[in-house]
Amino acid sequence: MSDLDARWLIGAAILAVFVLLLFALRAGWRAKGRAQADICPPPPGDAVGGRLVERLDDVHYVATTLDGRPLERIVHAPLAFRGRCLLEVLVDGVRVTIRGIESFAIPRSSIVAVGARTATIDRVVERDGLTTVSWRLATAEGGARASAPPVAAADADAESIVVHTSFRVVDSAERDRLEAALATLRPATTPSNEESR
């Protein structure tokens, strides 16, 4: 066998491994999507309105994760992928517009807590460097909710689960402005779950 043939075989083997890896990643993502099929998409961005309290146009949307499962990202659009976003805190809630993705809303009535964290899936920053909004996201009525952890009795709601949406604001002054604006929607507390550790 010539050197050229050996190089072609090695190249073909590497390509085959790469293609198999892509198929495995896609299969895993689709399986997670099926496991979360009972989780409804968030309300569209225009579902919240009222007076503008704060507007930040260079915020990093990090992730939305399940309560008690800080490494389990919600994989449905528009919550699935991180990116830079426009964040608007309004009297009726929060509007998040990730670049290139349809905006979504976190209604004021669904907000459970607002707090600071150090880590979530794919991101570890300085102490309290992430601003997190904990809120209730609807589930399909009568859904099995196998993918979601049990909701505490005090927060029991048969048609919703608690999720945590994390944002990264690098500039500390802007982060303080964001947290002050969010505090007008709900008193600032640090959600007590594994994600805040």
Image: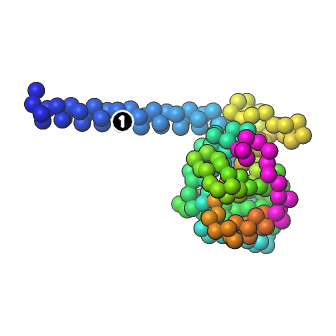
In the rendered image, the vertical position of residue 55 relative to residue 18, given as above or below: below
Q: Residue furthest top?
A: 1
Q: Using the rendered view, name the quadrant where residue 187 is placed.
A: bottom right
Q: Secondary structure at mark 1?
A: helix
The amino acid type, in three-letter code, at marker 1 is Val
**Residue 35 shows in this picture:** yes
Residue that numbered label 1 is attached to: 19
The scheme the figure's colours follow is rainbow
Q: Is residue 186 magenta?
A: yes
**Residue 146 vs residue 192: left or right?**
left
Q: Residue at x 76, y 50 (%)?
A: 134
Q: Residue furthest left?
A: 2
Magenta segment boundaries in residue numbering? 183-197
**Residue 138 shows in this picture:** no
Q: Residue at x 84, y 37 (%)?
A: 152
Q: Position of residue 139 (x, y in %)?
A: 74, 40
Instruction: State the predominant SS element of the stretch in magenta.
Output: loop
